[in-house]
Amino acid sequence: MSKATTTRRVDYFQLPRPLWRKLKKCLPKKSNKKSSRRDGRPRASDRAVINGIWYVLWTGCQWKAVHRDWFGVSSSVIHERFQNWTRRGIFEKLMKRMVEYYAKEHAGIGWRWQAMDSKSSAAPLGGEKTGKSPTDRGKRAAKINLLVDERGAPISVVLTGANRHDKVSAIDLIVSLLIKRPANKEQHLCADKAYDATDVREFVSSEGYTAHIKVNPRRTKGGGEESSGESSQQYISPKKPHPARRWVVERTISWLTKRRSLRTRWAKKAENWMALVQLACAHILLNLAVFG
Protein backbone atom coordinates (compact mmCIF):
# COMPACT_ATOMS: atom_id res chain seq x y z
CA MET A 1 0.00 0.00 0.00
CA SER A 2 1.49 3.34 -1.09
CA LYS A 3 2.23 5.98 1.49
CA ALA A 4 -0.30 8.82 1.52
CA THR A 5 1.04 12.17 0.43
CA THR A 6 0.04 15.36 2.17
CA THR A 7 -0.98 18.35 0.07
CA ARG A 8 -0.96 21.97 1.13
CA ARG A 9 -4.48 23.32 0.92
CA VAL A 10 -5.62 26.82 1.66
CA ASP A 11 -8.43 27.34 4.15
CA TYR A 12 -10.23 30.38 2.75
CA PHE A 13 -12.14 30.88 6.02
CA GLN A 14 -9.22 30.95 8.45
CA LEU A 15 -5.88 32.73 8.46
CA PRO A 16 -3.01 30.26 9.13
CA ARG A 17 -2.19 30.12 12.83
CA PRO A 18 1.54 31.01 12.49
CA LEU A 19 0.61 34.09 10.47
CA TRP A 20 -2.01 35.06 13.04
CA ARG A 21 0.58 34.88 15.83
CA LYS A 22 2.81 37.30 13.91
CA LEU A 23 -0.09 39.64 13.12
CA LYS A 24 -1.27 39.68 16.75
CA LYS A 25 2.06 41.20 17.78
CA CYS A 26 1.54 44.04 15.30
CA LEU A 27 -1.96 44.95 16.51
CA PRO A 28 -2.42 47.89 18.90
CA LYS A 29 -2.55 46.90 22.55
CA LYS A 30 -5.97 46.94 24.15
CA SER A 31 -6.59 49.29 27.04
CA ASN A 32 -6.83 47.68 30.49
CA LYS A 33 -9.35 50.27 31.65
CA LYS A 34 -12.85 48.82 31.93
CA SER A 35 -15.61 50.88 30.46
CA SER A 36 -18.21 52.23 32.87
CA ARG A 37 -20.93 51.49 30.34
CA ARG A 38 -22.41 48.02 30.51
CA ASP A 39 -24.81 48.29 27.60
CA GLY A 40 -23.98 47.51 23.98
CA ARG A 41 -22.36 44.56 22.30
CA PRO A 42 -18.86 43.39 23.21
CA ARG A 43 -16.02 44.20 20.84
CA ALA A 44 -15.70 41.79 17.92
CA SER A 45 -12.77 39.39 18.04
CA ASP A 46 -9.68 40.41 16.05
CA ARG A 47 -9.23 36.77 15.06
CA ALA A 48 -12.72 36.65 13.53
CA VAL A 49 -12.13 39.95 11.72
CA ILE A 50 -8.85 38.85 10.13
CA ASN A 51 -10.53 35.62 9.01
CA GLY A 52 -13.11 37.75 7.18
CA ILE A 53 -10.33 39.82 5.57
CA TRP A 54 -8.56 36.60 4.60
CA TYR A 55 -11.74 35.36 2.91
CA VAL A 56 -12.13 38.58 0.90
CA LEU A 57 -8.47 38.40 -0.17
CA TRP A 58 -8.85 34.93 -1.63
CA THR A 59 -12.34 35.11 -3.11
CA GLY A 60 -12.38 38.72 -4.31
CA CYS A 61 -15.97 39.16 -3.11
CA GLN A 62 -17.45 42.45 -1.97
CA TRP A 63 -17.11 43.31 1.71
CA LYS A 64 -20.87 43.43 2.12
CA ALA A 65 -21.12 39.89 0.70
CA VAL A 66 -19.46 38.43 3.82
CA HIS A 67 -22.20 36.86 5.96
CA ARG A 68 -22.25 37.30 9.73
CA ASP A 69 -22.87 33.56 10.20
CA TRP A 70 -19.51 32.69 8.64
CA PHE A 71 -17.27 34.54 11.10
CA GLY A 72 -19.64 35.83 13.78
CA VAL A 73 -18.88 39.41 12.72
CA SER A 74 -20.81 41.74 10.44
CA SER A 75 -19.28 42.78 7.13
CA SER A 76 -19.31 46.46 8.15
CA VAL A 77 -17.18 45.72 11.23
CA ILE A 78 -14.72 43.68 9.14
CA HIS A 79 -14.33 46.46 6.58
CA GLU A 80 -14.13 49.22 9.19
CA ARG A 81 -11.41 47.47 11.18
CA PHE A 82 -9.53 46.56 7.98
CA GLN A 83 -9.36 50.24 7.05
CA ASN A 84 -8.34 51.16 10.60
CA TRP A 85 -5.51 48.62 10.55
CA THR A 86 -4.47 49.84 7.10
CA ARG A 87 -4.22 53.45 8.31
CA ARG A 88 -2.09 52.27 11.27
CA GLY A 89 0.25 50.40 8.90
CA ILE A 90 -0.46 47.01 10.50
CA PHE A 91 -0.10 45.01 7.28
CA GLU A 92 3.13 46.77 6.37
CA LYS A 93 4.50 45.86 9.82
CA LEU A 94 3.33 42.27 9.30
CA MET A 95 5.14 41.95 5.98
CA LYS A 96 8.33 43.42 7.46
CA ARG A 97 8.10 41.03 10.42
CA MET A 98 7.64 38.09 8.02
CA VAL A 99 10.68 39.18 5.96
CA GLU A 100 12.73 39.10 9.17
CA TYR A 101 11.27 35.71 10.11
CA TYR A 102 12.05 34.33 6.64
CA ALA A 103 15.63 35.66 6.85
CA LYS A 104 16.06 34.01 10.25
CA GLU A 105 14.78 30.64 9.04
CA HIS A 106 17.03 30.66 5.95
CA ALA A 107 20.11 32.18 7.61
CA GLY A 108 19.59 35.46 5.78
CA ILE A 109 18.05 36.83 2.60
CA GLY A 110 19.35 35.39 -0.67
CA TRP A 111 20.98 38.63 -1.82
CA ARG A 112 23.26 37.13 -4.48
CA TRP A 113 20.57 36.91 -7.18
CA GLN A 114 17.59 39.25 -7.07
CA ALA A 115 14.91 39.87 -9.69
CA MET A 116 12.16 42.41 -10.31
CA ASP A 117 9.07 42.50 -12.49
CA SER A 118 5.52 43.86 -12.55
CA LYS A 119 1.97 42.56 -12.98
CA SER A 120 -0.91 44.64 -14.31
CA SER A 121 -4.37 44.09 -12.81
CA ALA A 122 -7.63 45.46 -14.16
CA ALA A 123 -9.24 48.18 -12.02
CA PRO A 124 -12.85 48.55 -13.27
CA LEU A 125 -13.77 51.03 -10.51
CA GLY A 126 -10.70 53.20 -11.02
CA GLY A 127 -9.34 55.01 -7.99
CA GLU A 128 -5.93 56.10 -6.76
CA LYS A 129 -2.77 54.90 -8.54
CA THR A 130 -4.59 53.59 -11.60
CA GLY A 131 -4.09 54.51 -15.24
CA LYS A 132 -4.99 53.58 -18.78
CA SER A 133 -3.52 50.20 -19.63
CA PRO A 134 -1.40 50.32 -22.81
CA THR A 135 -2.04 46.61 -23.40
CA ASP A 136 -5.81 46.46 -22.76
CA ARG A 137 -7.41 49.09 -25.00
CA GLY A 138 -6.85 51.90 -22.51
CA LYS A 139 -8.98 50.41 -19.73
CA ARG A 140 -8.24 51.43 -16.14
CA ALA A 141 -5.66 49.20 -14.48
CA ALA A 142 -3.10 49.16 -11.68
CA LYS A 143 0.31 47.56 -11.46
CA ILE A 144 2.06 45.54 -8.74
CA ASN A 145 5.85 46.02 -8.90
CA LEU A 146 7.82 43.36 -7.06
CA LEU A 147 11.43 42.75 -6.05
CA VAL A 148 12.36 39.27 -4.78
CA ASP A 149 15.47 37.47 -3.55
CA GLU A 150 17.00 34.42 -5.20
CA ARG A 151 14.35 32.08 -3.70
CA GLY A 152 11.44 34.27 -4.79
CA ALA A 153 10.71 35.88 -1.41
CA PRO A 154 9.12 39.34 -1.82
CA ILE A 155 11.31 41.95 -0.13
CA SER A 156 9.91 45.09 -1.75
CA VAL A 157 6.55 45.97 -3.33
CA VAL A 158 5.34 49.20 -4.96
CA LEU A 159 1.96 50.06 -6.51
CA THR A 160 1.65 52.26 -9.59
CA GLY A 161 -0.81 52.99 -12.36
CA ALA A 162 -0.73 50.73 -15.42
CA ASN A 163 0.37 53.67 -17.58
CA ARG A 164 3.53 54.22 -15.53
CA HIS A 165 6.65 52.72 -17.10
CA ASP A 166 8.48 49.96 -15.25
CA LYS A 167 11.78 51.82 -15.41
CA VAL A 168 10.30 54.57 -13.20
CA SER A 169 9.22 52.16 -10.45
CA ALA A 170 12.53 50.24 -10.54
CA ILE A 171 14.22 52.94 -8.46
CA ASP A 172 11.30 53.01 -5.98
CA LEU A 173 11.57 49.24 -5.53
CA ILE A 174 15.24 49.38 -4.59
CA VAL A 175 14.74 52.37 -2.28
CA SER A 176 11.70 50.77 -0.56
CA LEU A 177 13.40 47.55 0.57
CA LEU A 178 11.93 46.26 3.84
CA ILE A 179 15.30 45.08 5.13
CA LYS A 180 18.74 46.66 4.91
CA ARG A 181 20.98 45.36 2.14
CA PRO A 182 24.51 44.19 3.01
CA ALA A 183 27.18 46.67 1.89
CA ASN A 184 30.06 44.35 0.98
CA LYS A 185 28.37 41.45 -0.75
CA GLU A 186 28.10 40.39 -4.39
CA GLN A 187 24.60 41.15 -5.65
CA HIS A 188 23.10 40.58 -9.10
CA LEU A 189 19.82 42.07 -10.28
CA CYS A 190 17.82 40.46 -13.11
CA ALA A 191 15.10 42.24 -15.08
CA ASP A 192 13.39 42.07 -18.46
CA LYS A 193 13.64 44.53 -21.35
CA ALA A 194 11.04 46.89 -19.82
CA TYR A 195 13.80 48.07 -17.44
CA ASP A 196 16.33 48.66 -20.24
CA ALA A 197 17.05 52.36 -19.67
CA THR A 198 20.26 54.28 -19.11
CA ASP A 199 19.12 55.94 -15.88
CA VAL A 200 18.02 52.56 -14.44
CA ARG A 201 21.38 50.96 -15.25
CA GLU A 202 23.26 53.90 -13.74
CA PHE A 203 21.20 53.83 -10.53
CA VAL A 204 21.48 50.04 -10.20
CA SER A 205 25.25 50.28 -10.64
CA SER A 206 25.50 53.09 -8.07
CA GLU A 207 23.64 50.91 -5.56
CA GLY A 208 26.26 48.17 -5.87
CA TYR A 209 24.32 45.79 -8.13
CA THR A 210 25.59 43.91 -11.16
CA ALA A 211 22.78 44.42 -13.68
CA HIS A 212 21.43 41.62 -15.88
CA ILE A 213 18.82 43.50 -17.88
CA LYS A 214 17.53 42.14 -21.14
CA VAL A 215 18.27 44.42 -24.09
CA ASN A 216 15.25 46.05 -25.69
CA PRO A 217 15.48 45.48 -29.48
CA ARG A 218 13.99 48.95 -30.08
CA ARG A 219 17.06 50.52 -28.49
CA THR A 220 19.52 48.52 -30.60
CA LYS A 221 20.78 49.67 -33.96
CA GLY A 222 18.42 48.91 -36.82
CA GLY A 223 15.27 49.68 -34.81
CA GLY A 224 12.43 47.20 -35.13
CA GLU A 225 13.38 43.91 -36.77
CA GLU A 226 16.09 41.68 -35.37
CA SER A 227 18.68 40.05 -37.58
CA SER A 228 18.74 36.78 -35.62
CA GLY A 229 17.04 34.99 -32.77
CA GLU A 230 20.09 35.40 -30.55
CA SER A 231 19.81 39.18 -30.35
CA SER A 232 16.59 38.95 -28.33
CA GLN A 233 18.43 37.04 -25.62
CA GLN A 234 21.30 39.51 -25.19
CA TYR A 235 22.06 41.05 -21.82
CA ILE A 236 24.31 43.91 -20.89
CA SER A 237 26.13 42.13 -18.09
CA PRO A 238 29.63 41.15 -16.98
CA LYS A 239 31.95 39.14 -19.21
CA LYS A 240 31.10 35.92 -17.41
CA PRO A 241 27.77 34.58 -18.76
CA HIS A 242 24.98 33.67 -16.33
CA PRO A 243 21.69 31.83 -16.94
CA ALA A 244 18.45 33.81 -16.69
CA ARG A 245 16.99 33.93 -13.19
CA ARG A 246 13.89 36.04 -13.78
CA TRP A 247 11.60 33.03 -13.38
CA VAL A 248 11.64 33.37 -9.58
CA VAL A 249 9.84 36.73 -9.64
CA GLU A 250 7.43 35.48 -12.31
CA ARG A 251 6.60 32.52 -10.07
CA THR A 252 6.00 34.79 -7.07
CA ILE A 253 3.68 36.98 -9.15
CA SER A 254 1.71 33.88 -10.15
CA TRP A 255 1.40 32.98 -6.44
CA LEU A 256 0.05 36.46 -5.74
CA THR A 257 -2.52 36.38 -8.53
CA LYS A 258 -4.03 33.16 -7.23
CA ARG A 259 -5.84 35.49 -4.85
CA ARG A 260 -8.79 36.94 -6.71
CA SER A 261 -8.63 40.30 -4.93
CA LEU A 262 -5.20 40.86 -6.50
CA ARG A 263 -6.11 39.52 -9.94
CA THR A 264 -8.69 42.30 -10.28
CA ARG A 265 -8.48 45.44 -8.19
CA TRP A 266 -11.87 46.44 -6.78
CA ALA A 267 -10.51 48.78 -4.10
CA LYS A 268 -10.65 52.46 -5.00
CA LYS A 269 -8.18 53.42 -2.26
CA ALA A 270 -4.61 52.49 -3.14
CA GLU A 271 -3.68 51.89 0.52
CA ASN A 272 -6.48 49.31 0.89
CA TRP A 273 -5.27 47.33 -2.10
CA MET A 274 -1.67 47.66 -0.91
CA ALA A 275 -2.72 46.19 2.45
CA LEU A 276 -4.14 43.12 0.70
CA VAL A 277 -0.94 42.78 -1.36
CA GLN A 278 1.16 42.97 1.82
CA LEU A 279 -1.00 40.34 3.53
CA ALA A 280 -0.55 38.04 0.52
CA CYS A 281 3.22 38.65 0.51
CA ALA A 282 3.35 37.81 4.24
CA HIS A 283 1.65 34.48 3.50
CA ILE A 284 4.13 33.71 0.71
CA LEU A 285 7.03 34.51 3.06
CA LEU A 286 5.55 32.16 5.65
CA ASN A 287 5.29 29.33 3.10
CA LEU A 288 8.86 29.87 1.90
CA ALA A 289 10.14 29.96 5.50
CA VAL A 290 8.32 26.75 6.47
CA PHE A 291 8.29 24.70 3.27
CA GLY A 292 11.32 26.21 1.52
Image (cartoon, rainbow, N blue to C red):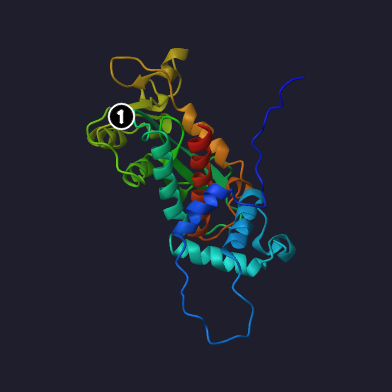
Q: Residue furthest right?
A: 1
Q: How many marks?
A: 1
The answer to which image quadrant residue 180 occupies is top left
Residues 159 and 31: in front is 31
User: Horizontally, is 57 left or right of 145 in the view?
Assistant: right
User: Which percent across, then down, holds residue 191?
Assistant: 40, 30
| Residue 268 in sight here | yes
Horizontal and vertical percent for residue 291?
Answer: 53, 33
Q: Amino acid at mark 1?
A: Gln
Q: Residue 208 location, x and y as percent?
A: 24, 33
For disc 1, the neighbor class at 10 Å (few under 14, some 14 to 19, many from 20) is some
Residue 198: % across, % down: 29, 33
| Residue 138 seen anywhere in this rendered image of the structure | no
- Say which residue appears at 34% left-offset and 44% top-offset: 179
Rendered residue at 62%/61% (across/down): 48
| 194 shown above or below 244 | below
Indicate whether 30 appears above or below 143: below
User: Looking at the image, which residue is at 49% across and 55% down?
Assistant: 23
| Residue nearest the observer in this picture, 182 or 126 | 182
164 relative to 27, above or below: above
In which quarter of the view is residue 268 placed? Answer: bottom right
Q: Give the camera-side residue of 128 and 20.
A: 20
State the SS at label 1: loop
Q: Residue at x 74, y 20 (%)?
A: 2
> 95 or 161, which is in the foreground?
95
- Quarter of the figure that contains the N terminus: top right
Residue holding disc 1: 187
